[in-house]
């Protein structure tokens, strides 16, 4: 991977070098092909000097909201003058988005340089696994190890890690979280994690470690019982949304909402959050509690000015994100029924649209029937036209199959359109929105898989997932960022 043909003397590491690393990662077992194993990842980090222990960890699992909460926690840590490494998945445009330093995707040069440095050692692990009759390190296992190595090289003050899938056997679980955060648990990936919330919670509770601190969103009773028991076994403190902390009030407004949060150590009134929906307000409360647990052990109130500064920099690309206006084109990665329901409620509350055209694409491992049932129920009376399409992912469900499912759950055949190409789907949807009755505030919602949303963002010229930078405009008398406490 250190072939000089991949390097440009004037520009450093070029785009092709990142893509060549990505191609090598993609040649491995895919990230959705999870096996119950951690030993290969432990072997890999051990041979690299345990980079997962180079900084304390805030570890996130759950079904919905993990990336949004991770980004909120990251912004809060940065506002407290901490250098943050964030590892999330999947990405929207570039694989480097998964490994972020202070809110920005890792530099291409760093991504490739660290890969070049660790690749020979990982090859030794592959050889050992082959001798043991095991398959080589997978895509997600390799990317996780690479993230740890990047964070150790920077170095960062704290790592914010989102599990890829589950918890117990997830590659990120070689790290021990100082704070374990569990977002709402619902049914997803049931073929791998279990058929009900209790089974899924058992898998996700595996990130709760001794000497840690559990912060959990409100859960259905079956999941809450599992998490509570896991925290007691590990003898760690625990706090649950709706019991010890939560959203006290919120007022939707232009560009977001005003939220008052009761944390576990303090009350934070009138925070201006530039994100839409009750679910994002709840995500904020979860992030605030996690920050209180990490920074002050749950006993020290955050500085309100720091928290408001963090809120001003909170973004969630691909989640109810407006990419165009007149008509509004909104993208939202609602890839399971609970996510689709939360997004629909937020869209209806915040955008004031009187007609909507849907563009939908879903991956094979998702519960497409229930997602479509949710879309039909939540947008009844608002949506008349639906275009089924697909991303370029080989896991995408053919549009014709989605249309057949849509008819089964109540959509009308005359309202449906099918195309294999996303660009054609967007053109068709915009045309249908433009043809809406005069006086109606129309829009287009592109929803379903993250791969579909990522490709739509690229087609529509959205910036990469870079977040908002803490810059000179944030400075006051004490500088651009203020200290802890």
Image (spheres, rainbow, N blue to C red):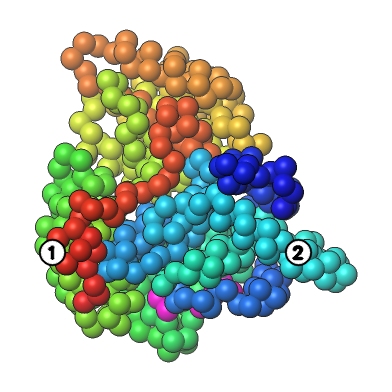
Vertical order, 10 against 28 (above or below): above
User: Which contiguous range is marked in magenta?
Assistant: 173-180
C-alpha separation, residue under disc 1 versus residue under disc 2: 49 Å
Q: Residue at x 35, y 80 (%)?
A: 238
Left or right side of 282 for 413: right
Which residue is located at x 72 percent, y 53 percent?
A: 2
Q: Earlier in the sequence, mark 1 or mark 2?
A: 2
Secondary element at tag 1: loop
Q: On residue 120, which mark appears?
A: 2
Single out the residue that lies furthest toward the bottom. 235
In magenta stretch: residue 298: no
Out of 335 and 42, give the one closest to the viewer.
42
Residue depth check, mark 1 versus mark 2: number of the one nearer the observer: 1
Q: What residue sits right under mark 1 in the picture?
A: 477
Q: Is residue 16 visible to the viewer in this orientation of the structure?
A: yes
* 473 horizontally vs 454: left or right: left
Residue 285 placement (x, y as % from top left): 26, 63
């Amino acid at each position: 991977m250190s072939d000089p043909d991949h390097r440009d003397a004037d520009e450093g590491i070029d785009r092709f070098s990142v893509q060549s690393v990505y191609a090598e990662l993609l040649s491995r077992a895919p990230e959705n092909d999870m096996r119950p194993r951690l030993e290969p990842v432990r072997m890999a980090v051990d041979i690299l000097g345990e980079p997962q222990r180079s900084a304390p960890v805030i570890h996130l699992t759950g079904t919905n909201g993990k990336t949004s909460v991770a980004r909120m926690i990251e912004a809060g840590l940065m506002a407290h003058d901490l250098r943050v490494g964030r590892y999330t998945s999947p990405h929207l445009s570039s694989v480097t988005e998964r490994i972020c330093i202070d809110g920005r995707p890792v530099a291409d040069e760093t991504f490739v340089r660290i890969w070049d440095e660790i690749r020979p050692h990982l090859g030794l692990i592959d050889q050992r696994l082959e001798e043991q009759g095991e398959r080589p390190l997978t895509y997600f296992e390799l990317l996780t190890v690479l993230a740890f190595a990047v964070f150790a090289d920077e170095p960062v003050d704290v790592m914010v890690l989102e599990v890829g899938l589950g918890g117990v056997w997830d590659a990120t679980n070689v790290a021990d979280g100082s704070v374990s955060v569990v977002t709402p648990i619902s049914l997803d990936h049931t073929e791998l994690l279990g058929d009900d919330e209790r089974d899924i919670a058992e898998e996700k509770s595996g990130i709760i470690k001794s000497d840690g601190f559990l912060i959990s969103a409100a859960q259905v009773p079956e999941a809450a019982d599992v998490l509570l028991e896991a925290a007691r076994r590990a003898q760690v403190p625990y706090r649950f949304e709706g019991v010890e902390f939560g959203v006290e009030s919120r007022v939707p407004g232009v560009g977001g909402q005003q939220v008052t949060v009761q944390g576990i150590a303090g009350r934070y009134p009138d925070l201006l959050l530039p994100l839409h929906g009750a679910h994002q307000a709840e995500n904020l409360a979860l992030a605030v509690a996690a920050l209180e647990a990490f920074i002050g052990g749950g006993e020290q109130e955050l500085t309100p000015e720091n928290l408001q500064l963090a809120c001003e920099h909170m973004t969630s690309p691909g989640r109810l994100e407006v990419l165009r206006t007149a008509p509004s084109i909104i993208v939202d990665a609602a890839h399971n029924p609970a996510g689709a329901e939360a997004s629909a409620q937020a869209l209806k509350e915040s955008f004031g649209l009187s007609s909507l055209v849907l563009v939908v694409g879903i991956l094979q491992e998702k519960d497409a029937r229930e997602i479509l049932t949710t879309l039909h129920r939540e947008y009844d009376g608002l949506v008349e036209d639906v275009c089924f399409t697909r991303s370029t992912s080989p896991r995408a469900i053919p549009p014709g199959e989605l249309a057949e499912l849509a008819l089964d759950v109540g959509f009308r055949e005359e309202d449906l359109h099918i195309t294999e190409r996303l660009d054609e789907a967007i053109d068709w949807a915009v045309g249908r929105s433009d043809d809406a009755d005069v006086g109606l505030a129309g829009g287009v919602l592109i929803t379903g898989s993250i791969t579909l949303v990522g490709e739509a963002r690229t087609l529509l010229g959205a910036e990469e997932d870079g977040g908002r930078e803490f810059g000179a405009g944030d400075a006051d008398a004490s500088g651009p960022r203020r200290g802890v406490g």
